[in-house]
Amino acid sequence: MNEVSRHAPSWLRHFRRKRLLIPSTTLVLLLGSLAWPLPRQVTRQAPVHSVRVTDKFGQTLRIVGSDGRFKWVPLGDIDPAIIGALIATEDRSFYLHHGVSVSGIARAVRDNVRAGRVVSGASTITMQVARALRGSDRRRLSDKLLEAHLAVRLELHESKEAILEEWLNRVSFGNRILGIGEAAEFYFGKSAEDLTLSEATLLVGLPQSPSRYNPLRHIDRALARRETVLRAAEREGVFTNDQVETIRRTVPTLASRQAVNFAAPHFVDAVRRSLGSEWANVVEVRTTVDPQLQHSVEELAKSHLRLVSPLGVSNVAAIVLDNHTGNVLAWLGSADYWDAQSLGQNDGVTALRQPGSSLKPFAYAAAFRRGLLRPESIIPDLPIQVPGAGGAFSPVNYDKKYHGPVSARTALASSYNVPAIRLAQLVTPEKILDDLHDVGFASLQRSARRYGVGLVLGNGEVTLLELARAYSSLARAGSIPDVRTVEWLLTVDGDTLLSPAPTSHQTVIDEGTAFLVTDILSDAEAREPAFGRGGPLELPFPAAAKTGTSKDYRDNVTVGYTPAHTVAVWAGNFDGSPMQRVSGISGAGPLMKAILLEIGSGGLFDVPREMAFATVCEGSGKLPGRFCRNTASRPVSRTQLPSDTCDIHVTIDYDLRTGRRATPDTPPSFRTAREFVALPEIYDEWMVEHGLERPPDSEVDNIALTILYPTDGTRYQIDPILREGWQRIALSAALSSNVTGAQWWIDGRQYQNVSDSVSWPLTAGTHRFELRGRVRDKTLHSQPVTVHVSSVQD
């Protein structure tokens, strides 16, 4: 006889004395079930087997079953008072029925009709066991009938004590926990036999609705549910009034997650998902995570979040990769796994978020490797209107300024948007998207036409894990690693299955291009115009870094890497709400820097043999000329060594009398040599705006009368939704200083005088634009420009 049966307290004998003859309403079910065997899982003591997940040193991260956390506890190890409270709360007629309670069904129907909604169920303890055995949470009538049938079979084949033991070990207590034994360990850090009555009665109330009464999120609800348990137990004589009052005054203390082996929770969840069906066949998983680094990342994240939370940042995520092996050393999905308010059980490492400018390095790599640009090539950072399906749009830089001629090095390091758009037009979105797929951004599943050139500004969605892996390929000289989370598996049969060892992985970027991008991202002087010096991207050892901020400040990321490690960090809100102008440099950047400082130096980046160093003019990217003042030694591929000499830094003889170029008739006493920056005409307007003097024109040459925008052959489409007044394009022109009376002519008709604020409303059809102006008594005409405007119907 079971221990509970031999030493039954008075309240338990009271329950049993009320047991009656078999009700006639269940007789048919009983007779129909006599020859029907029990399911196989009832013959096994454990509903699931446990899997021990450990860190790289073998310390337990979590013990989890194939369907949840599990630890089987014999009924004799449970305080009889706990069993009494369970019966009093869940099934007062447990010892009266044979699986199905007819009186319980009648009472539930009565209560639900009175309330006009479902307020009471009719499931007996045995039916709840049947539901757990079936593994179904559905509430259809057919499911109830199947549960009732299985409950009757259980009653025929098992004792009441065995059924109670099944309930205590099979029902869910929330947080993927099955059974009171694991629940005691998880919530209170102790075994089931060591539970106090205050703790035990709280646990007894959880299975009715584990999510609603989750004490980690809703302790008030859990205590209210415990009150229901206490009232039922007092009513049935399980507890005295004094005992109930004592329990009421006690609020159980929940154990810390570290105390119950619940470390790196998002990482363990990810490991389990990655193993798929293989999970059911293992008993231990040795992972790659470094426990000390994982703990440091968690503490650094909490400290950083306290600083940025006033700015509307509720969460952060981070991942650390070993660049040599591809091993995940730390994985932080959120700052607090148990914080319901910030949706902490979401995993920021695998969540799809907009990456902002963090994809730009791979667009520049696409241009470098195709020989379209060198890092010192000059890109115009000038206003540009980009045609799109919904009309043209004008990209702007983060600082709302245009910087004129900038090198690709400065444009990338300072994360300027306009040069990146021009580069995307040069390379094409199709080729950039192909390269992004090559470096592992599988989440970018739309077409290049759908993304357009906005791809380089982060209008797609990627994961932090994809970002970390792609940047790791830059650190690895273009070789992309296979991300490893598992070292080995121990199977239920005792076999050890080793995870594939790191190999020479696929090369996705040539070594030279990877080095050039790394050299730019580690160049503190190149990023100084946008980020200043000494900020979160600058470390005391060689490290490359890039930020990204999404539209409306909803997400920001920063990725940093040394030769040894890659760290990717996200900051934002899982509900998608915007932050208060928090960018990657202020949101994710400081945490990335703190983590890299915690890890330490990774040595020097290797310089590929194909690289040489050449001295270039920083203003033109060409070999320095006689009048170049700012030069620098830059890495360059031996196959792309610069050969042209700078032609923008010039000296011009100046006529002091006219303020113009000297002519052959200018006397030597009125000549003076002056240095100028002779930029192409496209920069004329920018130079005027910034007070920069162009080389003086003569009366016979260098007369500029040029349409800057629109460009010849541009096609526009009228948006049927936007109001007509909003669908205009800005007209832009470059004029020499000696041109007067300049006017816009459209389709052969005078339109407006040339100024800084001329715009033209989009009108369906083909249109011809022209500039007309005068130099002294001569009328000049610009090169005409033709554009095409279509409506949606066209």
Image (cartoon, rainbow, N blue to C red):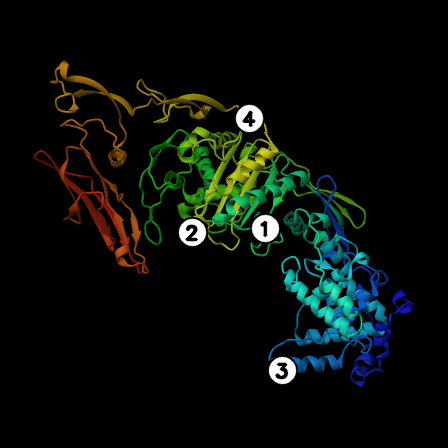
Direction left: furthest residue:
777
Residue 792 lies, in percent from the top left, at 32, 59
Q: Mark 1 points at which residue?
A: 347
Q: Which amino acid does label 1 sit on?
A: Asp
Q: In which quarter of the image is the C terminus?
A: bottom left
Q: Could you give the CA–CA distance between mark 1 and mark 4, rounded to whole angstroms?
A: 34 Å
Q: Which mark is residue 606?
A: 4
Give the Cα distance between marks 2 and 4.
38 Å
The image shows residue 419 at horizontal and vertical percentages of 37, 38
Identify the image quadrant of residue 193: bottom right
Counting residues from the start of the chain, the first of labels 3 and 2 encountered is: 3
Relative image position of residue 656 (x, y in whole percent): 15, 21
Q: Which mark is residue 450?
A: 2
Q: Which of marks 1 and 3 is in front?
A: 3
Comes first in the chain, label 2 or label 1: 1
Q: Is mark 1 on a helix, strand or loop?
A: loop
Residue 114 got which mark? 3
Kind of element beneath mark 2: helix
Q: First in sequence: mark 2 or mark 4?
A: 2
Viewport quadrant of the N terminus: bottom right
Distance, label 4 to label 3, CA atoms, is 78 Å
The type of residue carrying mark 4 is Asp
Q: In this view, does 138 lie to the left or right of 403?
A: right
